[in-house]
Image: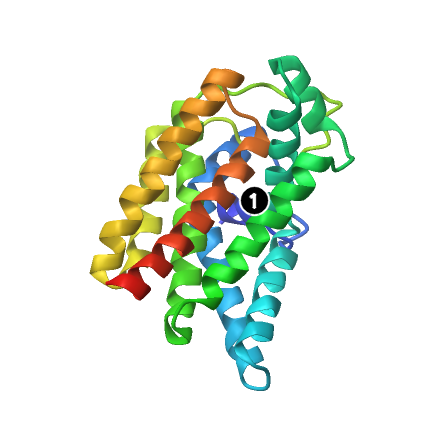
Amino acid sequence: MHIFFTALMFFTRIPVPASLPYSPGLLNKALRFFPLVGALVGALGAGALWLALLVLPLPLALLLSILATIFITGAFHEDGFADFCDGYGGGMTTERILDIMKESRLGTYGTVGLLAILTTKYTALLHLPPSEIFGLLIAGHTLSRLLPVLLVRTTPYIREDALSKAKPIGNEVNTVSLWIASLTALPFLLLLPLQLTVLLLPAALLVYWHFRHYIMKRTGGYSGDVLGALQQLVEITLYVVAVIYYNHF
């Protein structure tokens, strides 16, 4: 429970016991529950959508649902994606990329990237059958948090110094944690049609492979902002693939 509550504390705004102990070891182990935290975020987003649909039309209810998930996570991953866009868009060297990502100001690349990813997420979900959105929200938030765990397991960590504005992150994932993360994430795909799952898994792995290749070429490893960027990219990829599935199959 300490490990799970540590995951909740660092990846959401959900209150945890004030007596919760902290250590780098707990934070590293907390990554094993990253997908499970995603399932909780997705379920709360689906619940917010269901409640909003009782009194509001789908476009507005869907917008409130997305805002609810952003509030629950404290825009943790969206902030990482924006910093990733600023750093990798504006930096030419590893040192400059990391310096830009540490800045608190939002630049042009980050602004455009954030608007693009939120608009894509909203538009994709809006073009899905309303009854299918609930399961996809839960599965999308869950599976998109498994790939960052795999990235931590397979990729060098670019250590951030004390001047970084980012929260501490776990930077070690052992085989046991990767298995736990996988075994807690994959069952949530049962919420989706089997044919859609067959499309989603290769799409998520393809995004992961290209993303890892890109960051290794540019900086030789990952930082906390990079993990947030990967989560966002995988999440919207799943939604876009779902739109293709429901409209063409």
Q: Position of residue 20 (x, y in %)?
A: 62, 46
Tally the numbered discs. Answer: 1
Q: Which residue is under mark 1?
A: 6
Decide if residue 36 is on the left or right side of residue 100. Answer: left
Q: Quadrant of the C terminus?
A: bottom left
Instruction: Residue at 58% x, 59% y: name it.
Output: 69
Q: Is residue 147 above or below residue 116?
A: above
Q: Position of residue 144 (x, y in %)?
A: 43, 46
Q: Residue at x 32, y 43 (%)?
A: 203
Q: How is the image coloured?
A: rainbow
From where the camera sits, is residue 52 visible? Answer: yes
Q: Nearer the viewer, residue 39 or 103?
A: 103
Single out the residue that lies furthest toward the front: 248
SS under mark 1? helix
Q: Is residue 28 left or right of residue 90?
A: left
Q: Count neighbours of disc 1 (C-alpha within 10 A) and say few if under 14, some if 14 to 19, many if 20 or more.
A: many
| Residue drawn at point x = 46 percent, y = 63 percent | 125
238, above or below 154, in the image:
below
The amino acid type of the residue labelled 1 equals Thr
Q: x and y percent of residue 212 in the render? A: 42, 26
Q: Toward the viewer: 113 or 148?
A: 113
* Vertical placement of residue 154 versus 247, above or below: above
Q: Is residue 192 shown to the viewer in this render?
A: no
Q: Quadrant of residue 139?
A: bottom left
